[in-house]
Amino acid sequence: MTGRTRGPEEGRDKMKIRGTTILAVRHRGKVTVAGDGQVTLDTTVMKHGARKVRRLYHNQVIVGFAGATADAFTLFDRFDQKLEQYKGNLVRAAVELTKDWRTDRVLRHLEALMIAVSRDSFLIISGNGDVIESDDNVMAIGSGGPFALAAARAMVRYSDLTATEIARESVKIASEICIFTNDHVTVEEIDLEEEPDEIPVKGKEKGKEKEKEKEKEKG
């Protein structure tokens, strides 16, 4: 009698990290990304307050992630490097990330979706090589994404709420329907009416430090 050896793929399916809800809204001069905090392993809620929405590239890009937490940190770091390389050009950085995502021996095994927004761009990025721009300035990913998307579109059309209020309330509505989403909502916002922070230039920073050191020596 021989026993059947369980392969790694089968084991991964049986203990799968499931679902989330990430929503992005561009409305009335603001761009907001909101995400819930639940981490579900198989049939067990492992964490209630995970932070799935982060700022990158000197706070000028907001990224939300649907997938395993370890995968998220890997992709956040790689994406931040691409943004630095292409000086904040979100579309170019997204395209280059998807190239790596498909070809890199480590990244190509990650099954995930990302939302990435800036003052100028509004994107969904996938490991299949897709870089998708929204048609109506509302987009969502994750297991609760369709519920949050429907709620947000209704609020954009028929309410006077701000982008941040719409995003927060839409994720909360999704949490009432999707069992893999909770109402612990993280929100990040870009105000399009405010001037963006000046991005520090490494060469200039070093030059200023040297000038300060010389002034101290003279003094």
Image (cartoon, grey):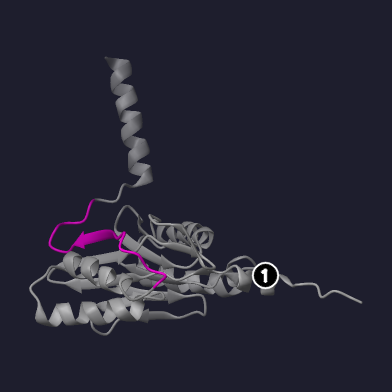
Picture residue at 37% right of the left edge, 65% below the top:
64
Give whichever of 119, 162 is nearer the camera: 162
- Classify 74 as above or below 121: above
Please, what secondary structure does the residue beneath circle 1 have?
helix
**The C terminus, quarter of image:** top left
Tell me which segment is drawn in magenta.
179-197
Residue 27 image position (x, y, % from top left): 16, 72
Q: Quadrant of residue 117?
A: bottom left
What amino acid is found at the position of numbered circle 1 in the picture?
A: Gly
Q: Which residue is mark 1?
A: 11
Q: Residues within 10 Å of mark 1 (few under 14, many from 20)?
A: few
Give whichever of 201, 19 is nearer the camera: 19
Residue at far left of view: 160
Q: Is residue 182 left or right of residue 10?
A: left
- Classify 190 as above or below 178: above
Residue at far right of view: 1
- Specify whether residue 22 is painted magenta: no
Q: Is residue 19 left or right of residue 117?
A: right
Residue 103 image position (x, y, % from top left): 60, 73
Q: Is residue 49 left or right of residue 190?
A: right
Picture residue at 30% right of the left edge, 19% below the top:
216
Magenta region, main secondary structure = loop
Residue 4 image position (x, y, % from top left): 82, 75
Picture residue at 63% right of the left edge, 70% below the top:
12
**The N terminus, quarter of image:** bottom right
Q: Quadrant of residue 76?
A: bottom left
Picture residue at 41% right of the left edge, 74% below the top:
142
Residue 15 image position (x, y, % from top left): 60, 67
- Specify whether residue 192 is painted magenta: yes
Residue at far bottom of view: 135
Q: How many marks?
A: 1
Give whichever of 187, 196 is nearer the camera: 187
